[in-house]
Image (cartoon, grey):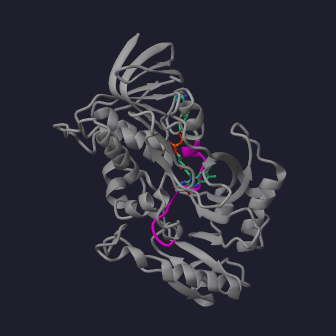
Amino acid sequence: MRHSYDVLIIGGGVAGASVARELARYDVSVALLERNRGLGMEMTSTNMTLVCQGGDALTFRPGTLHAELNVKSIPLWPGFAEELGVPFKRIGGLGLIRDKADYKRFLKMYSRAFKSSLKPDAPYYIPEGSFKPLEFLDKRRLRDLEPEINPSIQGALYDPNLAVTDPAELTRALAENARANGVDFFLGYEVKQVEKTPEGFRLEAGGEVFETRYVVNAAGIEADRVAELVPGARDFSYVPVKGVLVDLDEEASTVLRHHVYLLQRPLEPHVKAAVPLLDGRLRLGIYLEYTYRSDREAGREAVDHDLRVIEEIAPGRDYRRHISRVIVGVMPLTNAETGWHDFIVDIPDHVPGWVNIVLGPAGVSAAPMLGRRVAELLAYSGLSLEPRRGFNPRARRGVEA
Ligand SMILES: Cc1cc2nc3c(=O)[nH]c(=O)nc-3n(C[C@H](O)[C@H](O)[C@H](O)COP(=O)(O)OP(=O)(O)OC[C@H]3O[C@@H](n4cnc5c(N)ncnc54)[C@H](O)[C@@H]3O)c2cc1C
């Protein structure tokens, strides 16, 4: 069978679904191809579920797309989630202070937070009212919020803005809204071949042929391999990083109510954080390891690390007896040698009409802005984006394989 569209999106994670939903606002024909028989089943389902909303987003390197898309998404999130009917719960974040060294680092973060975003002419302006100020808590106030916290902890930097969502549910909602507004979905269609044509591109997936003028490559950890299908489209690189997460059962998960984390000490490679999920479980992590992309093994060392995190934060229980599941996610890290990750959302110089997306850390948080950025890029490269009459931002229609 032969299909023809203005835009084809490869990949049905949060990135592809955000783009599909944004393009549904315009009078263009769009389809999304996903190799799995469901949406959001890869990186989008294997993360900490955090929506960076305050101090955390402001620690991202200024000038990067990673910082820009995240900071600009901050004020959009409440309306975005409400319109799509997905959860957005402000659980608040507590950065624990063990000693003077921690305190000094938090002071630096605190003084940077929001500083460059509050003036109306700031490049990443956050309208006042979109966030609450961060606050230092002493030991007593910290224990009021988290009674089971380790008594050796001296205090905390409290960020009341931090939120969680359900990234897989968000992806489904974005896709179902796009579907209700005319976007087609092909699940179980793996793109295996792409050919450049005078008009655009010809793709083969699921034994069928798709012709299109524009392609958005949102294939997650496979974005490099998909880009390699077209000469010149792969003008980026990244390394795969595995993150191992441990969820506790509901009984042990009552120990914390906020996102609680410890700063990494020099040369410590792993993140130390605990996040109360929307389903009542506490997620621990993140044991991080450079690896190959198909590695989904959670070794003993990784699980032990994640358990040590909660033992350090709230000692006194035998958490090992309360493990409910272990999750492994693999994400792309650009600029691994400097540690300053950045997103890639760009058109390669020699392949007009082709957009690459590589997210990695904090990609879910950037979802409200991502679709807009891709629509801008497509418009720059000649796609006419006339608003679609009758676009309904709340409508839903099922997307099935
Ligand atoms: C351990 C960990 C913790 C994280 N924590 C957070 C957090 O707390 N907050 C946050 O904002 N972000 C977090 N992230 C990052 C976030 O999960 C990612 O940025 C986001 O999910 C990336 O979405 P994506 O759509 O680019 O990729 P994916 O969700 O992987 O989607 C890509 C899709 O492309 C499909 N695909 C691949 N190749 C093909 C092909 N040839 N044909 C058709 N389809 C194809 C795949 O099947 C997949 O469904 C975390 C990530 C990890 C690993």
Farthest left residue in view: 389
Q: Is the magenta stretch mostly helix, strand or loop?
A: loop
Tally of numbered tags: 0
Residue 117: image location, x then y, percent: 38, 73
Residue 30: image location, x then y, percent: 33, 30
Given residues 290 and 14, the one toward you in this image is 290
Question: For residue 44: magenta?
Answer: yes
Residue 373: image location, x then y, percent: 36, 49
The quadrant in which residue 106 appears is bottom right
In the displayed structure, would residue 294 be above or below residue 124? above
Quadrant (top left, top right, bottom left, bottom right) of the N terminus: top left
Farthest front residue in view: 350
Given residues 228 and 389, the one toward you in this image is 228
| Magenta stretch bounds | 43-55
| Residue drawn at the location 35% of the way across and 76% of the way down | 118
The quadrant in which residue 264 appears is bottom right
Given residues 76 and 220, the one toward you in this image is 220
Residue 356 is left or right of residue 339, and the answer is: left
Given residues 366 and 157, the one toward you in this image is 366
